[in-house]
Image (cartoon, grey):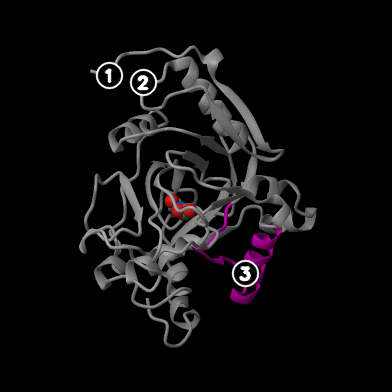
Amino acid sequence: MVPQTRYPSAMVTITPLLPHLGARVEGVDLSRPVDDATFRRIADAFEEHSVLVFHGQRLTDEEQMRFSERFGPLEATINSIGQERRLHPNLVDLSNVDPDHDEKLMGWSDRRMLYQSGNQLWHTDSSFKPVPAKASLLSGREVPPVGGETEFVSMRHAYATLPEGTRRNIDGRVTVHSILYSRSTIAKGLFDPEHERALPPVRQALVRVNPANGRTSFYIGSHAWYIEGLPYDESRRLLDDLLAHTTRSELVLQHRWTQWDLVMWDNRCVLHRGRPWDAAKHARVMRRTTLAGDGPTAEPPFATRTELWDGIVPEGVGV
Ligand code: OGA
Ligand code: MN
């Protein structure tokens, strides 16, 4: 039995990291049941700061799932390369330790690592699903001594600082997202045909409002393929411009991992990406739980103009 220790919420401190993004949360042990007042402070800080960093959280898979579920239902992992040996369906295993070969380290040329390298593109988790993720919680179980950082930027801050004309141009639009599109920019053959059929392109509102606080954000990232109602080239250019505006270096929050950090982010208004490290030399083992979102964000949820696919994927790059 876990002792029912109560942590008075007064013990929790929340320290902003950047003026527009991120906060460090201290004074709580997430491996124990968290009382309601403490939980409320954490949930409020999440809505306000979008990225929360908790140091020294030595969590088991079950403890991570239990804390995550306080925020709402969890999402299940998609069937993809490297997830064949599933842990619990609510856990994503991000690791370069090969379970099939005596825990040997996998380098970047390994097909499973190539798939994972998609995480190095700016993205928001599960934007390719009809109900995209609300939040992700990533636990650093084993971290490399150099590299392998995770970076975050705020699409909410980016929306707030857009020129008025751009804001008018994007309000009310719908973007088509596809993981087959995003992974096609990396390599071919990353999905088996039966996986592909399970991942049709989805429609997402380009501009979203957080129902908890009314804050507005646009919603893009690596899976964002094209914007409906614009010529394809123009929509690609607009997506690239929005990304460049969001990811200016002075706006990036970089998290350098120490073992047992837990980092939680708001997928509705934050983009993130992993940074490379020497994967053939150092282990990096991370576990993610993902909160299901409210959705779909656009009706109907599935795109019908999938015939565009043939014209877009460059010759020789299958998916
Ligand atoms: C993720 C992710 C990046 C990283 O867990 O969703 O994109 O740094 N991770 O591991
Ligand atoms: Mn991710």
Residue for badge 2: 33
Q: Is residue 209 above or below residue 118?
A: above
Q: Residue at x 52, y 57 (%)?
A: 147
3 or 2: mark nearer the eye: 2
What is the CA distance from the residue labelled 3 to the residue labelled 2?
Answer: 47 Å
In the image, taking residue 163 as reference, residue 289 lies left or right, namely left
Q: In which quarter of the image is the N terminus?
A: top left
From the image, tell me which residue sits under label 1. Answer: 2
Distance from the alpha carbon under mark 1 to that under mark 2: 8 Å
Callouts 1 and 2 close, C-beta under 8 Å: yes
Magenta residue check for 275: no
Q: In terms of depth relative to the viewer, which is nearer, 141 or 252? A: 141
Name the residue type under label 1: Val
Q: Name the residue under label 3.
A: 235
Residue 236 is covered by the magenta coloring: yes
Q: Which residue is drawn at 43% across and 69% down?
A: 183
Q: Camera-side residue: 183 or 294?
A: 183
Check disc 3 and give the amino acid type. Answer: Ser
What secondary structure is marked by label 2? loop
Q: Is residue 317 among the parts visible in the rendering? A: yes
